[in-house]
Image: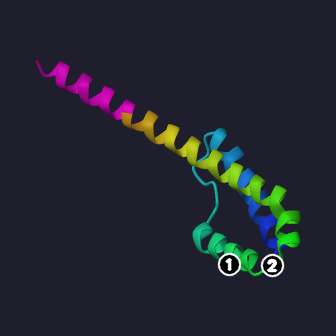
Amino acid sequence: MEAGLQALADEAAAAREALARGEDDIGLENVGPRIERLVKAAMQLPPEDVAALQPLMSRVRDDLQGVSDLLGEAIEAENDAANDDEASDNGADR
């Protein structure tokens, strides 16, 4: 469980850094099912074990949220650029 969380935390941090550098390939393949498996495994742990994993789970959450935020910003910037191009093209036709 801890090894799986650590691997996901490392991958999420690397994805966040890659995205911040503007890279297209950020990894995180099949992240949804992996998170589901880890959550199910965590739910089977005794409370004291879950408490010990809390900092690592928080790190995974924060890094995945960071990836989501950066993706949202990139999509918004791309949409803005497309809208600007369309407005320029429409203005040139007049």
Estimate the spatial distance between the alpha carbons at disc 1 and disc 2, rounded to whole Å: 9 Å
Q: Which residue is found at the position 74% from the left and 59% from the top?
A: 11
Which corner quadrant holds the N terminus? bottom right
In this rendered view, identify the residue nearer to me: 36 or 12: 36
Residue that sits furthest to the front in the current view: 47
Q: Position of residue 65 (x, y in %)?
A: 63, 49
**Residues in magenta, as a range:** 80-94
The stretch drawn in magenta includes residue 69:
no
Q: Residue at x 64, y 62 (%)?
A: 28
* Magenta region, main secondary structure: helix
SS under mark 2: loop
Tag 2: residue type? Leu
Badge number at residue 24: none
Q: Is residue 68 above or below residue 6?
A: above
Residue positioned most to the left: 94
> Taking 55 as reference, is 20 above or below it?
above
| 41 in relation to 89, above or below | below
Q: Quadrant of the C terminus?
A: top left
The residue lying at 75 percent from left, 74 percent from top is 42
User: Horizontal placement of 29 versus 3: left or right?
Assistant: left
Give the label on residue 45, or none.
Answer: 2
Q: Nearer the viewer, residue 53 or 80?
A: 53
Res 40 label: 1
Please, is residue 53 above or below residue 87 in the view? below
Question: Where in the figure is residue 44, as x and y percent of width and height?
Answer: 75, 81
Which mark is first along the chain, 2 or 1? 1
